Amino acid sequence: MSGSDEVGPGSGPGSGAAGQDGEGYAGLRIERARELARRHGWATVRVLEPGDLMTMEYRQGRLNLAVRDGVVERSWEG
């Protein structure tokens, strides 16, 4: 369950009605985090499990989720 998951259109980070930033997903199960990200308008959600390689470029509208055992440990935009 790693890689990017397109979740729908968005004009930028936190472009949803709630204006959610990239933090605040820690502790959530991955399914719930993806659901909330979709609701808050994130264009892309990237799930990173331990040992996954990741590029370091910044992408507006992308939410990154560091996940271990199906639970988000850290979240950030870009």
Image (tube, helix red, strand yellow):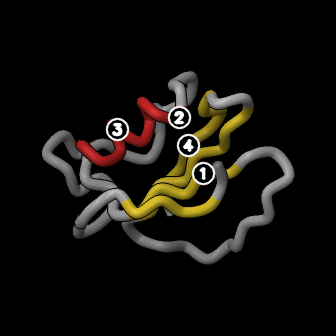
**Which mark lies nearer to you, 1 or 4?**
1
Mark nearer the N terminus (1 vs 4): 1
Quarter of the image for residue 36 reads: top left
Write down the residue under mark 2. Answer: 30
Write down the residue under mark 1. Answer: 47
Write down the residue under mark 4. Answer: 75
Secondary structure of the residue carrying tag 1 is: strand
Q: Amino acid at mark 3?
A: Glu
Q: Would you say 73 lies left or right of 78 here?
A: right
Residue placed furthest toward the front: 1
Q: CA distance from mark 2 to mark 4?
A: 11 Å
Residue 62 location (% of width, % of height): 45, 62
Mark nearer the N terminus (2 vs 1): 2
Q: Would you say 15 lies left or right of 45 here?
A: left
Residue placed furthest toward the right: 51
Q: CA distance from mark 2 to mark 1?
A: 9 Å
